[in-house]
Amino acid sequence: MRLVLLGPPGVGKGTQGARLSQALGVPSVSTGALLRELIASGAETPQVQEARQILRGAFVSDSFANALAFGAMAGQPGFILDGYPRSVGQAEALEGALAAQGVRLDAVLLLKLSAEALSERMAGRRLCLGCGATYHVRIAPPKCEGVCDRCSNKLGLRPEDDQPEKRRLRGQLYETQTAPLIAFYHGRGLLHEIDAEGLPEAVFRKVCESLRRLI
Ligand code: ZN
């Protein structure tokens, strides 16, 4: 399966991507996670500086995004993309790269959520400062408050979430960049909309139903 997850920051793409990855046995490629890994690597290269700017809400150049995503997808029989493509230019590059391998995307799942629900979800997101595992204080809390289930490190805010102003900026960036992308995939007959209201289990059931109709 080759899937793209679309939706505003905070809608739950990472959570659904991880579940799909387990269910389908293909890797989930999250550009947010890749950027955070890059920054955690410690080296202060121009690439790391650009990654930090991007997480702070800066525009991602197509060439940087393509290189990041293609690197993670290389040699994989399938994937679930989360956070890529972000522009029509990137979507065309992805289409071209897949066509060169004689394959194509199976579906693009668009997760939709009301503005109030989105801001509540983003405010509750937490990140393990040790291993990068993600949590939500209400819908996916750790067993012990503020502590990672996997590695017992402290949980904190994501670098891209820690100020309401940054969250608003990313929301605006999403609107301007993603609206044309939705039209692009709709035109390709690949777009499937999913109501992302509710707990992760309920949303995952809707995602699976949508995929079943495809197969
Ligand atoms: Zn951890």
Image: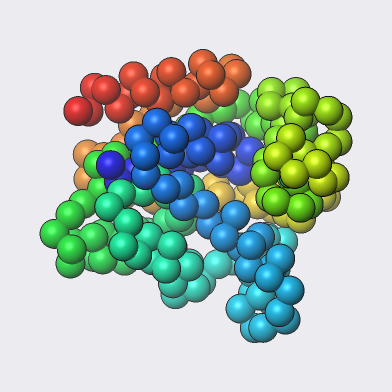
Q: Quadrant of the N terminus?
A: top left
Q: Quadrant of residue 10?
A: top right
Residue 184 is left or right of residue 189, and the answer is right
Q: Quadrant of residue 8?
A: top right
Residue 67 visible in rendering:
yes
Percent position of residue 55, x then y: 67, 60
Q: Residue furthest left?
A: 102
At 73% across and 54% down in the image, what residue appears? 160
Q: Quadrant of residue 117?
A: top right
Measured along the vertical axis of the image, is residue 63 above or below residue 102?
below
Residue 185 is left or right of residue 195, and the answer is left
At 22% across and 39% down in the image, what residue appears? 189
Question: 92 or 52, which lies in front?
Answer: 52
Percent position of residue 193, x then y: 39, 29
Percent position of residue 163, x then y: 83, 50
Percent position of residue 145, x then y: 86, 29
Residue 169 is left or right of residue 64, and the answer is right
